[in-house]
Image (cartoon, rainbow, N blue to C red):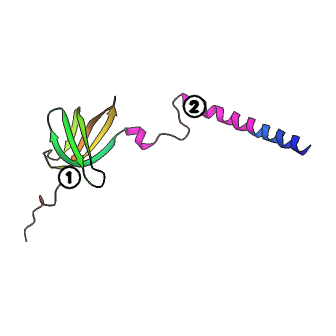
Amino acid sequence: MKQGRKFLSLAVTLALLTGAAMPLAAAHAAGKSAAGTSSKSRNGLRQFSGVVTAFDKTTLTVEKGGKKPESRVFTKHAELRTTGDLEKDARVTVYYRDENGHAVAHRVVVKKNADDSTTDR
C-alpha cells in the first residue's frame, strides 16, 4: 500500500511540474524570457584587445600575445567609430559582432601609451 501512495505522490508531483513548465516554454518560444534579457544579448558586442598588426580601408588585424597568442582579422563596419589615432603597433580594444561567421568591427578604442604622455619637471 505504501508503494501505491508513493507512486501516486510522484505522479501528482510530476504532473504539477509539467503543468508549471508549459507556460514558461511557451513564453520562451515566443521570444519572451521570464528572466529578462542579459546585457550581452542587448547590445550583442564582444571585445578583443591587442596590438594592430595591419589595417586598410576594409579590414583590421589585431594580435593578442601572452600564453595563448591569437590573431584576428576584423571587417570594418560602414559606421565604424574610432576613439584615438588608429595606427600600426597601437594597442586597441575592438568591439565587434559575429555576422554570418565574420567578425565585424563596430567600434575601436585606441589605448594611450605611457610614452605618449609627456610631463615637464
Label 1 packing within 10 angstroms: few (<14), some (14-19), many (20+): some
Three-letter amino acid code of the residue under disc 1:
Lys
Nearer the observer, 29 or 101: 101
Q: Quadrant of residue 20?
A: top right
Helix, strand or loop under label 1: loop
Label 2 packing within 10 angstroms: few (<14), some (14-19), many (20+): few
**Looking at the rendering, in which quadrant would you find the C terminus?**
bottom left
Say which residue label 1 marks: 111
Percent across and percent down for residue 45 are: 34, 40
Q: Quadrant of residue 52?
A: top left
Dot label at residue 27 = 2
Measure the alpha-carbon separation of dots 1 and 2: 43 Å
Percent across and percent down for residue 111 are: 20, 52
Asked if the stretch drawn in magenta spans residue 18, the answer is: yes
Asked if the stretch drawn in magenta spans residue 26, the answer is: yes
Question: Left or right: 49 with respect to 6?
Answer: left
Three-letter amino acid code of the residue under disc 2:
Ala
Residue at the extreme left: 120
Helix, strand or loop under label 2: helix
Nearer the observer, 83 or 11: 11
